[in-house]
Image (cartoon, rainbow, N blue to C red):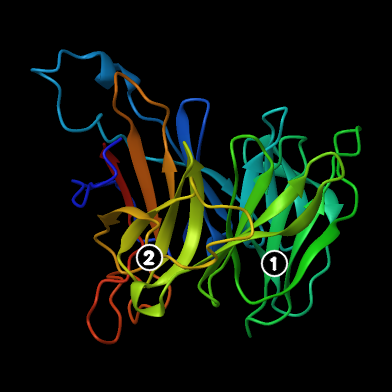
Amino acid sequence: MDYALQDVDFSELSLSLQELAEGPRWQGGSFYWCNITRGEVWKWTPDLHFFNADSAEKPLLPALSKPELLVKASSMVGAFCFDREERLILLTEKGLELYEGEGESRLLLPVSFKKGGRFNDCIVDPSGRILAGTLYPDHEGGALFSFSPDGKGGFFKGEELLSGIKISNGMAFSADGRRFYHTDTARGTIISYEYLEEEGLLGGIQDVIKIEPEMGGPDGMIMDDGVLWTALWGGSAILLLSTEGVAWGKNMGRSEGRILGKIECPALQPTSIALSPVFDDRRMILVTTAAYGAVDGDNGLSPQGEFLGGKIYIAVI
């Protein structure tokens, strides 16, 4: 991967603008993402025959078929994930729900929030626990919870791992599962912790990456081959950050010296990214963006006339 990439030729999927598209991921040959405020989960399946075409005749992208609305929940879907059995788990305002197909879901574990609270982003650990963040409208009192499988298809009550979070956001694990990375957008930090997989607990802080405010706020995040890809809300970009060669407990602080690359995004408010597997030395990147805060939801423009987002972008890199 050429991490010096600055320009990526993005195309748009055929959709109306989405207010708060988030949490994209690749699963079983398709991309999935949620539109939080509408309670939606979307699915887009690219034509993978594209990667087998003769390079001289290959187009820039697979045919951009129309995405499928997979879930329309009765409340906001703050996050979703696929568990170790590849079941689709929805993290809604009601709690943890199992998607059962044909638009139907079943509540597995009720979760109570203070007024206005909801989940925001999640990840599955190597043992099948769901780690999920919460946030509130005043950006105070957010937390990170761990939900362990109960062995009967459900989950035990969440265990609080972190508190005092402003905007809990992107998460990732190192390849060996020994480090857990967590984003607090409002503080501009990505903090890594020792992860004690057997107990499902966090150990001490191992590293802190601080994103300067003028760059935007770190939002959704993935780990790929030791590199953190983080969407910069308000920064019109995806930032690629090195985690290698950073000594545990040392070199904490600013992002300087960590930046491997920066991919410009056509929207001011990218929220997260997902990568497909590598096919014939190439792969797809999908970027979700948000029209949140737009004066007109149909055009996604800010009061100053900037395009905030709401489109789903796709490219081959």
In percent of the image, x 31 and y 69: which residue is there? 268
Q: Earlier in the sequence, mark 1 or mark 2?
A: 1
| Within-10-Å neighbours for mark 2: few <14, some 14–19, many 20+ | few
Q: Secondary structure at mark 2?
A: loop
On the image, the x and y values in percent for residue 93 come to 72, 63
Question: Which corner quadrant of the image does residue 252 belong to?
Answer: bottom right
Mark 2 sits on what residue? 256
Measure the C-alpha gap from mark 1 to mark 2: 29 Å
> Percent position (x, y) of residue 149?
85, 39
Tell me which residue sits at (24%, 77%) in the image: 306
Residue type (three-letter) at the residue carrying disc 1: Thr
Residue receiving disc 1: 134
* Amino acid on which the number 2 mark rests in the picture: Glu
Left or right of residue 207: residue 276: left
In what element is the residue under mark 1?
strand
Along the line of sight, which residue is nearer the eye, 228 or 310? 228
Quadrant in which the C terminus appears: top left
Q: Is residue 247 visible?
A: yes
Figure check: 58 above or below 252: above
Q: Quadrant of the N terminus?
A: top left
